[in-house]
Amino acid sequence: MLELYHAGLTACSKKSRIVLKEKGLDYVSHYVSLSDFEHHDPDYLKLNPNGLVPTLVHDGAVIIESTVINEYLDEVFPEVSLRPADPVARAKVRVWAKLADEALGPNMIVTFSNAGGIGKSARSLEGDDLEALIERIPLMERRAVITKITKGGGFSEAEFAAAREKAGFIVDKAEAALTDGPYLAGDSYSLADINMVPFMHRYRQRVVPDKVTPEKAPRVCEWLDRILDRPAVIDTFAISDETRPED
Ligand SMILES: N[C@@H](CCC(=O)N[C@@H](CS)C(=O)NCC(=O)O)C(=O)O
């Protein structure tokens, strides 16, 4: 049995939800509300000690980290393969997996600073409640983010600028890669595209909308629209029983 603990429309959750849907795999969906800090519940931390989503449980085996989950799913369920056979193209998929992990940073700065979601919930706390929340966060760097947006005056203009620069760098990489083929790793649709699409979508929507335009990044825009049009991706991005509208 496959079970996915996820937070619906968050970027990392989408990464693994797309793979499950592309492969047509049945899974039990467990929505973990980040706004209610359910990812810090002791029971959830037993599965994912980092206190992050997503988490996959496959016949009792627990797999964490969205990029790792996606590789695992592709290894265990190879019928619909999401990695090319050619080792050079496979290496490209791995480089994109690494970039997708790096792509989270700029997205998080903007998401946590937004008026809604987890940022809003954290900012609504004060005193002992806020201290208790901060104390419960397992990862040092996530504790630092929550401390900054609640007690530290939020991210500085310099931090936003650095996040935008990093996002722009990744958009440029994608634009260059897409001169070699219709997909990020070349000829075939792969985990490279799946791991990147949730971030590129957010980059266009709210991180660097001035950069992801048909004039400045024509190949990225065409690729993004093409990937967003796949039935599995449409299903993943839609508000449904698996998601919450506020994500
Ligand atoms: N490297 C992790 C990052 C996971 C991650 O940051 N997930 C976000 C949602 S996209 C999350 O759980 N955020 C909650 C928090 O930071 O408190 C992965 O890829 O699984």
Image (tube, helix red, strand yellow):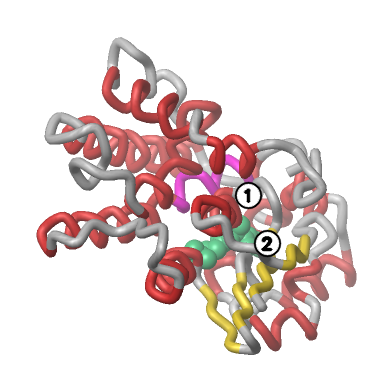
Camera-side residue: 7 or 114?
A: 7
Camera-side residue: 32 or 126?
A: 32
- Amino acid type, label 2: His
Residue 109 magenta-drawn?
A: yes
Other residues around mark 1 within 10 Å, as few (<14) / some (14–19) / many (≥20): many
Label 1 sits on a secondary structure element that is loop
* Residue sitting at x 43%, y 71%: 68
Residue that label 2 marks: 6
Could you give the CA–CA distance between mark 2 and mark 1, rounded to whole angstroms? 8 Å
* Residue sitting at x 55%, y 36%: 231
- Identify the main secondary structure in magenta: helix
Q: Which residues are magenta?
A: 104-111
- Whether label 1 lies within 8 Å of ligand 1 gets the answer yes
Q: Locate residue 77 relative to residue 9 in the image: left or right.
A: left
Camera-side residue: 236 or 27?
A: 27
The quadrant of the picture occupied by the C terminus is top right
The quadrant of the picture occupied by the N terminus is bottom right
Residue 41 higher or lower than 154, as above or below = below
**Which quadrant of the figure has residue 55?**
bottom right
Q: Locate residue 226 relative to residue 28 in the image: left or right.
A: left
Name the disc covering residue 10, or none: 1
**Which quadrant of the figure has residue 212?**
top left
Residue 90 lies, in percent from the top left, at 20, 61
- Which quadrant contains ligand 1? bottom right
Counting labels gives: 2
**Which quadrant of the figure has residue 13?**
bottom right
* Residue sitting at x 35%, y 28%: 223
Residue 216 lies, in percent from the top left, at 28, 16
Residue 149 higher or lower than 197, as above or below = below
Q: From where the camera sits, is residue 145 visible?
A: no
Label 2 sits on a secondary structure element that is strand
